[in-house]
Amino acid sequence: MQRSIFNLSQMKKLEQEQFLPLTLDQAWQILCNSKNLNEVTPDNMVFEIISGLSDTMYEGMLINYRLKPMLNIPINWCSEITHIKEKDYFVDEQRRGPYKMWHHETSF
């Protein structure tokens, strides 16, 4: 299971659950490999990783990417992996991007 929490503002958040037909080990290997970010991002977002490709995720890791979520307008974004508990959860937070604040937690 993957659970995502998106803070849209200080007062609002979006929660989503997704059940994947994978073992915990398989899900962790796929979702904690930044090389797979493009594969798990919807095609309509036109997602491109600029830097931060790695087979394994670690606290302090910076990932820079460009996406085009609306009207094909590019947005540059930088996320930092701030917390990891192996096979339990990881947190990424926006360091540069379109939101005032972005805190995203993926739980397994």
Image (cartoon, rainbow, N blue to C red):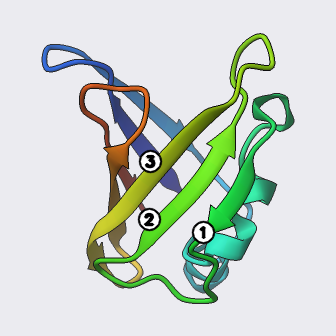
Q: Does residue 52 appear to the left or right of 3 in the view shown?
A: right
Relative to the observer, which residue lies in front, 7 or 22?
Answer: 7
Q: Residues within 10 Å of mark 1 (few under 14, many from 20)?
A: some
Question: Between residues 38 and 85, which one lies in front from this camera angle?
Answer: 38
Q: Is residue 43 above or below residue 30?
A: above
Which mark is nearer the camera, 1 or 3? 1
Residue 10 % position (x, y): 14, 20
Marks 3/2: CA–CA distance: 7 Å
Q: Amino acid at mark 2?
A: Phe
For the residues bearing labels 3 and 2, Cβ distance under 8 angstroms: no
Report which residue position mark 3 lands on: 3
In the image, 69 versus 25, the foreground residue is: 69
Contact? badges 1 and 3 (CB < 8 Å): no
Instruction: Kindly report which numbered mark, 2 or 1, lies closer to the viewer in this rendering.
Output: 1
Which residue is denoted by mark 2 in the rendering?
108
Q: Quadrant of the C terminus?
A: bottom left
Which mark, residue 31? 1
